[in-house]
Amino acid sequence: MMAIADNDIIQEYNTSMKDIGGVKDINAIFKTIMDYFKDSDSVNKNIITNNEFDTRTVKTRQKIGWAMQKTVLQFINGSHEDLIASIFLPRIPVQDKKYAFFWQIALNNRLFREISLDVFVKNYFTGRAAITNDEIIAFIKEQITGKNISGIKWSEETFYRIATKYLNLMSKLNFVSEGRTKQYNHIRPSAESQALFLYFAGLYAPQSNNILSNRFLPLSFIHEDDIHGRLKKLALKGFFNMNYNGVALNIEFIHDYKGICDVLFK
């Protein structure tokens, strides 16, 4: 198991998300995640030796393998690892896996998380019809490279590839349309995915049970005005306990990270 720091501790930026976004078939990624929990060496076997991601050069395969290890197969603790192992199984619906995959990368990759929070989801909630490469590039230049952070010397080509591969991944997740113009789709996680989201949010900010104060919350794609009603319905199903005092909306898990999928997808 590869451990990462608590997500409240600032992570270093890396561009591994563009290698993930370049993979043609997202289901090949999901299979590799599942295989990893049977045999950790399967990542290199699937990607480099067997070329299951259908890439032309060994160098590209190696970069994707590195990105998988750097961004996807990273776990904060054993509970996090148990959660991912239980999600990427054949019996879990593909669209639920797609939401979980989005949250997993957002949890592990600072660049992906900040683009998602401050550009992608922000635009979505303001009612924008589409999102462009230029918006993402402008955000990176202003908020990241514009701060002259040590070690970040990205070229214009890197900016462009980050933006295009990010949006390519969003289309594979069915969050935006395919084609040159990336129109927002109606993004509505299932009840099961909404419950899973709380576990990812808990991993991001384990020191607080108040979901309203959790910076991860917008990534649920549930508007803050609707969150209380949505979660109340889920709590009534016995997925977790909830307490709302008008200010804080506290979530208390009934089921552990290893067993939650057995409850949600029985």
Image (cartoon, rainbow, N blue to C red):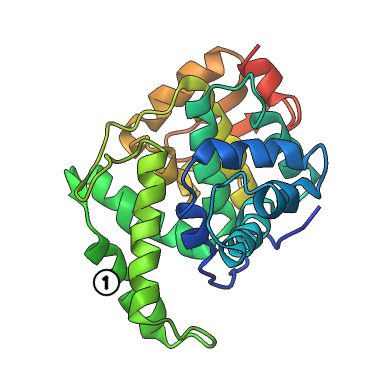
Query: Residue 227, image x and y in percent?
Result: 40, 31
Q: Nearer the viewer, residue 125 or 160?
A: 160
Asked if residue 145 is positioned above or below residue 37 in the image, the reply reads: below
Left or right: residue 222 versus residue 58 is: left
Q: Residue 247: where, in percent of width, then height?
A: 44, 40
Which image quarter is the C terminus in? Answer: top right
Residue found at x 35% / y 42%:
171
Q: Observer-nearest residue: 162 or 49?
A: 49
| Residue at the (53%, 57%) spot, across then down | 56
Residue 240 in the image: x percent, y percent? 62, 23
Left or right: 251 with respect to 160? Answer: right
Q: Secondary structure at mark 1?
A: helix
User: What count of labels does the image hold?
Assistant: 1
Above or below: residue 260 compared with residue 135: above
Residue that mark 1 sits on: 138
Residue 181: horizontal and vertical position, in percent?
19, 49
Q: Nearer the viewer, residue 116 or 27?
A: 27
From where the camera sits, is residue 206 visible? no
- Indicate the amino acid at tag 1: Ala
